[in-house]
Amino acid sequence: MTCKRNTFLLLALAIALLPSCIGSKKDATIDDIFKQGKIDPKLVPAGVGYVPVLPFFKGLLHPVDVLAGYDELIYVVDDRGLNILDQTGAIKQTITFSGATDVTQDRRLHTFVAARVDITVGGQSKNVAAVFHLINTAIGSYQIIDTLIHPFCDESRTGTGFRADDEQVKFTGLACTADNTLLVARTGPKNTDPTANPDNTVLKFDPNGKNLGYGNGLNPNSPSLKSVLGLSSIATFAAPPQRVFGMSESQDFLITQADPRKDIEFRTLWIKFILDPDNGNYHSENSQILNFDTTKASNFLYRPYCFANPTDIYAAPDGSGYLFIVDADSNKLYQFTQKGFEGVNPAANSSEKKQQLVSFGGKGSGPFEFDAPSGVCYFRKTVFVADRNNNRICRYKLSTDLQ
């Protein structure tokens, strides 16, 4: 235990001493801009609600994912690849990746990018899904130390050869647990082969890139409370800021399903990890979210057909435990509690007993509007939204967090 504690203390010290070439959190001016930004009093709601933190981050090209890293830098995936921003939103470095879709970071400050790569198979060029493993992104001298390439990174495909439909497989989401296990959301057409893992699944990798298996128990073909159809994102309950103690060690994860060809009643799911040493570990549904207590909330995470095209999900790691979801069809940012209730707790002096709705959106380019939002994250009471077609990263705070 002492060794583990010392490791994390050294990591925390390393974060505090990051070079200023990309942006230091010790800079008082940058820190103030990051924490508050500019709040337009005309945009503050009379009741509880989200307030835009200005300026929004510009200079991006169709951003599809946003991440506040453990190093407190902002990572944005767009058409060019991976953009590394400081806390003011200034782009300090762009790393080119083809077809990049997602980014995550583990507690070692290792960064992972889901993208595409060209390989040669049997003398022919193929374009396949890949996850690039980077280090030193915070200090401006990154290195790619490993690449997980489909289908070779999946141990169940060892010896099966390259299939004609492997180019249709996509890596659509990345997330890390507190022990630095990497989760990769995968979609594809091959889901009935008894000799290999289905394409529609969640792959797991240890910190060294070894495949630990897949989402055993998940349904790759039919909608259910544990299905994985057209996965568009994945999130865990471990997220920055970095902490030595108190971070969730849960192996559960959240997913969104965006397959437009399927009639999917519940497009956002909480998947439970069941530890079963006797029969093998597996994944199952979280039936507690089906508790529709209408005395406490007016809308629920598992309300049938609540979402049309959910593109990303994120779990706040602080005491709020809020779940954030963006939907590219409704052009909306949704907020739920971990009980599945939409909204935030009413104020202590309020006569209202139900959760107060604070979800918002609508198509447009105004401060409360989006055009195909595709990514969301949360850091130090600030929500970041990758507003794809408006080429910007929007920031918001709850009005009750402004004091």
Image (tube, grey):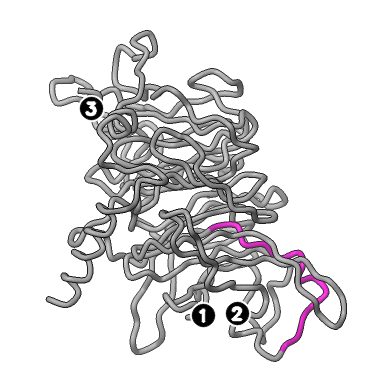
Image position of 389 with respect to 66: above or below: above
Q: Residue at x 27, y 55 (%)?
A: 242
Mark 2 and mark 1: span between their CA atoms?
Answer: 6 Å
Instruction: Rate crowding at label 3 as few (under 14), some (14 to 19) or many (20 or more) other CA atoms within 10 Å.
Output: some
Per the rendering, the mark at residue 26 is none
Point out residue 113 in the picture as x, y percentages from the top left corner.
55, 59
Question: Is mark 3 in CB contact (under 8 Å) with mark 1?
Answer: no
Image position of 46 with respect to 90: above or below: above
Tell which circle, 3 or 2, labels the residue nearer the N-terminal end: 2
Does 10 appear in magenta? Answer: no
Image position of 156 with respect to 221: above or below: below
Residue type at mark 3 is Pro
Q: Residue at x 65, y 49 (%)?
A: 263
Mark 3 and mark 2: span between their CA atoms?
Answer: 47 Å
Residue type at mark 2 is Asp
Tell which circle, 2 or 1, labels the residue nearer the N-terminal end: 2
Mark 3 and mark 1: span between their CA atoms?
Answer: 45 Å
Read off the magenta span.
160-173
Question: Is mark 2 in CB contact (under 8 Å) with mark 1?
Answer: yes
